[in-house]
Amino acid sequence: MSKLVVTSIGPASSVQDGGRPGSQRYGLTPSGAMDRLALAAANTLVGNDLFAAAVEIGPFGASFTAHGGAVRVALAGAPRNADIGGRAVAFDSSVTLADGETLTLGFARGGSFSYLAIEHGIAGEPMFGSLAVNARAGLGSPYPRPLQSGDELKTQAASGAAERRIELPATPEAPIRVLFGPQDDEFSDENKKLFVDSEWKISATSDRMGYRLEGPQIKHLHGHNIVSDGTVNGSIQVPGNGQPIALMPDRGTSGGYPKIATVISADFGRFAQISAGRPFRFKAVTMAEAQAETKTFRDLLRSLPDRLRGIDEFGLNIEALRDANVAGQAVSATDAATWQVAAAG
């Protein structure tokens, strides 16, 4: 059996899959990938089920080494520099690591989470039907905690299949869409308008349980305590200090703060990818609009196999490129003698 060994990794990185749907009524948090589209795209590239377990890599860098045979992997999600022995590796594509080769990943750019899918999946014992890690609950497999240097992810040897890339729609630079409620009646019209008209940032103290939002204070009409009720991914609750918290996949299954709005499911992955400190806004939509976007997102997931394309093979040596004079002969815009060519005759 081949394996991918974690040679270095930052915090906020763990094994995640589609989560544990259907178990929340028992008090079991769903967990699962922060960005389901990126997880599904990476898995599609290597022929896995859409929501098979993969490595969810947080904002910091990581490296992985193949042992015991070749390992075929794919990368999707937040882009970052990636190379195998100085050979550049593209995102939204698959690549095979020969035995002993190391895939090195830099810091995330323009997002927070990248996904490394492994052909044939990650070997592990499902816990309540899933390998998804929830460190607080001690759930997940093969390690019920964030990944650490030296961890081994066992899998089958690479199939030798041709490498693929996948064409995904561009991520829109648009507000995060929300539905007001279910307790928006606990807030005045002025405060609801303040919520959608304001610029927000995600606090650096955020995690997979909740994103703390930095912005104006949202005031309650009747106090900040309600009878606890169920939560979903993207529930935005407002505690006593008036600073909203968006609940994420490792959230509690119920909560006792009023929820002013909920991020629509089609935008949840885009919301999860917003890096700490980057400004963004919310936009309120109707239930009909949210349902239409859910259908569109579902159709996108179903279309992923049809978006696969072949890869034109070529070698790119990063070290050689750094040493090359790719600009050619230097010229001066103010010295015509360096760029003008005399007319013949």
Image (cartoon, helix red, strand yellow):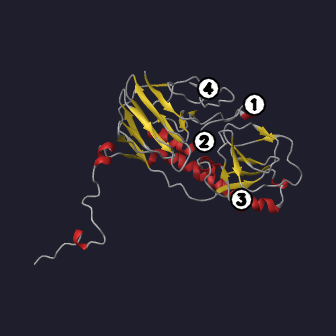
Q: Is residue 185 above or below residue 146?
A: below
* Quarter containing the N terminus: top left
Mark before the other along the chain sequence, 4 or 1: 1
Q: How far across and down, in percent of the image, does residue 99 sit?
A: 36, 26
Residue that appears at 61% across and 28% down? 145
Residue that carries the numbered disc 1 in the rendered image: 26
Mark before the other along the chain sequence, 1 or 2: 1
Where disc 2 sits, the SS reads loop
Q: Is residue 96 above or below residue 232?
A: above
Spatial CA span between label 4 and label 2: 17 Å
Mark before the other along the chain sequence, 3 or 4: 4
* Cβ atoms under marks 3 and 4 closer than 8 Å: no
Q: How far across and down, in percent of the image, does residue 168 sit?
A: 48, 51
Where disc 4 sits, the SS reads loop
| Circle number at residue 199 | none
Mark before the other along the chain sequence, 4 or 2: 2
Residue that carries the numbered disc 3 in the rendered image: 286
Quadrant of the rendered image containing residue 102:
top left
Residue that carries the numbered disc 2 in the rendered image: 34
Kind of residue sitting beneath label 2? Met
Kind of residue sitting beneath label 1? Tyr
Q: Nearer the viewer, residue 22 or 36?
A: 36
